[in-house]
Amino acid sequence: MRSVRKILVGILIFGLASVSSGLLAHGSGTGPSDAPEGIIVTRHFSGLWEQSEHQNQGFTLHVVHQYSGERTAVAFWFTFGEDKEPTWLMGQGPVIDNRIELDLYRVSDVEFLQQKNPDFSFAEIVGSALMEFDSCQTGAVTYNTDLPGMVEGTFPIEQFGWILNTHCSGGMSDDMPVDAVHGHQGLALTSTRDGIDGSGHAWFESYPNHVEFEVETEGLPDGEYRLYVGMYDRGGFSVQNGYGENKFSSPAEDGHMLLNFEPRGQRIEIHDNMGAVLSSFDNMMEEDDHSQYRGGHDNGHGQDDDHDYACDDDSGMGGGPGGGMGGHHGGDDCVEEGDFIEVEVNLENSGVLVEAEGEAEWEMNSHRIKFSVEIEDVPVGDYPLHVGGVEVGVIRTFAMHSGEVFGRISFRDPEVYGMEHLDFDPRGQKIEVLQGASVILEVDFPAE
């Protein structure tokens, strides 16, 4: 049966570029939904999709780029007509969150090897179809056409062929540029109304096949808040003891929500039940100008196959090629699958730079460990970071759009491009940030 599928798909793909080229500029869609909670359609949905309940029928799907920058898709539906003869339809339409809204076209009155006529289209619109996905491998199609025997209906689809060496997460890392390099941006959030003394910042960091976005607030009254990116609610979080945060990543990680939206080029706001309390106002993170992207099919959660910190494994810390962390000083060596540990502490000001602030954070899940230190309200420059009296890196600060200065350094095991290798254990150690030979911020990091 697989060989029959391959033959049908090959027939459809070959020579159909001329049919689709005149249609790609068309289509608008209904716009994004408010606060999508699941996956988004990425280029890694391109491939072969079978109608799992039907005999030798399905789709080839291509998520493609237009010069306008819009995300769109082209699908070829191979099926059978009332006469039991093979037939195919072409669909084209916008990609919106976890769905594709297709206009369906049929091509007729064309002979075998007929010469191409660029001034005339043999395609006519015959209906519409909605492809809606609940994972990287499964979805459903709802169709409505004018064709006999194909009036309307819904059926499930499953992916059985995808682009070689791709790994679908259903998040925005799937669509990272092929030539992506490590990059990060920070954005200050300031008060929007009288009586609000809090502040915050947003942070975006990307490296090949991984993206992180987080928002942190301090000084707000304790309570429940919502994060808005652009016009859309992207989730709630709690402020306790004046501090709150919301973290996203793609692929998703334990303790982070799946990053299934683009925060760059958008206004970022924190809302309470009366509206915005913090905002980036007209300051926005810069978007890149790439439109073609790079990214298995793991339903949203990426993992490092050569490192495992799960408690049902004997590997412990740094278990796998690459060495990992050594010299453990207490606390947890492992976490249960699906759980995570997070420890955050504020750095204490030594009095050298009286406005300086910072924090250190330790995160651990069953697949990786991350340690980061961030500082703010210091002059732009380089600040050595010492852990246990040993220099482990340098924090480089930069001025954000608002003029505030911010810097961060991150360590990770297993090591990834754009982050330092976490080959030390900060727990139970003194953390120090220096300006020259002077300590400006410090803290004794908890051992557990």
Image (cartoon, helix red, strand yellow):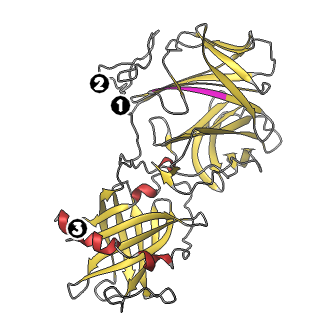
Question: Which residue is found at the position 56% from the left and 62% from the top?
Answer: 32
Q: Indicate the quadrant containing the N terminus: top left, top right, bottom left or bottom right.
A: bottom left
Q: Does 147 appear above or below 429?
A: below
Q: Does 241 appear above or below 10?
A: above
Q: Position of residue 253 (x, y in %)?
A: 45, 37
Q: Give whichever of discs 3 and 2 has the lower sequence position.
A: 3
410 is within the stretch colored magenta: yes
Can you tell which mark lies on residue 5?
3
Question: Which residue is found at the position 61% from the left and 35% from the top?
Answer: 245
Of the residues shown, which amino acid type is indicated by label 1? Glu
User: Can residue 88 be seen at all in this image of the molecule?
Assistant: yes
As helix, strand or loop, the secondary structure at mark 3 comes to helix
- Chain part drawn in magenta: 408-413
Of the residues shown, which amino acid type is indicated by label 3? Arg
> How far apart are the alpha carbons under marks 3 and 2?
42 Å
Left-right relation of 46 to 31: left
